[in-house]
Amino acid sequence: MKNYTIAESNIVINKLYPPKCSILEKSKVLLCPRIMEIDVEIGDQKIKKLVNCLVLSEEEEVLAFGENYIQPPKGKVYLTIREARRKIHEMKLIATAECKYTE
């Protein structure tokens, strides 16, 4: 998965993790959860902030979304993959991750 990041001036997106998939031994079926993670830094903030993140396709379709309170300097935002995009692990995907503060 190739990815690019966009964030408000003081939110740094360090890494976008794809879903952690496992394969069933007998049936060889690939199982993937609908959860992705993003590592973010909000280093210059003094108090915890609510950070909202989206993963968008090249066509700017929302692939995954989530939010979490981040205690400075860094933390994780857990994203839910949209139902229509559950097979995201099978795609060769160029995506953009965007994060911003939610008031």
Image (cartoon, rainbow, N blue to C red):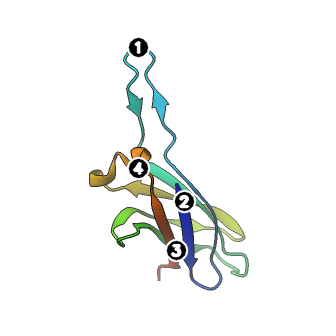
Secondary element at image label 1: loop
Residue furthest out toward the top: 26
Q: Residue at the location (48% across, 37% down)?
A: 21
The percent coordinates of residue 1 (x first, y second) are: 52, 54
- Badge 4 amino acid: Met
Secondary element at image label 3: strand
Q: Nearer the viewer, mark 4 or mark 1?
A: 4
Give the quadrant of residue 5: bottom right
For the residues labelled 4 and 1, say whether their Cβ atoms are less than 8 Å apart.
no
Give the distance between the C-alpha atoms of the residues marked 2 and 4, in whole angstroms. Answer: 11 Å
Q: Residues within 10 Å of mark 3 (few under 14, many from 20)?
A: many
Give the side of residue 17 with respect to residue 66, left or right. right
Give the label on residue 2, or none.
2
Which of the two labelled residues, at mark 2 and mark 1, occupies the earlier sequence position? 2
Give the label on residue 99, or none.
3
Identify residue for label 4.
91
Give the label on residue 68, or none.
none
Residue furthest out toward the left: 84
Secondary element at image label 2: strand
Give the side of residue 74 with respect to residue 91, left or right. right
Give the distance between the C-alpha atoms of the residues marked 4 and 3, in whole angstroms. Answer: 23 Å
20 up-or-down from 88: above or below: above
Q: Nearer the viewer, mark 2 or mark 1?
A: 2
Give the distance between the C-alpha atoms of the residues marked 3 and 1, in whole angstroms. Answer: 40 Å
Q: Residues within 10 Å of mark 1 (few under 14, many from 20)?
A: few
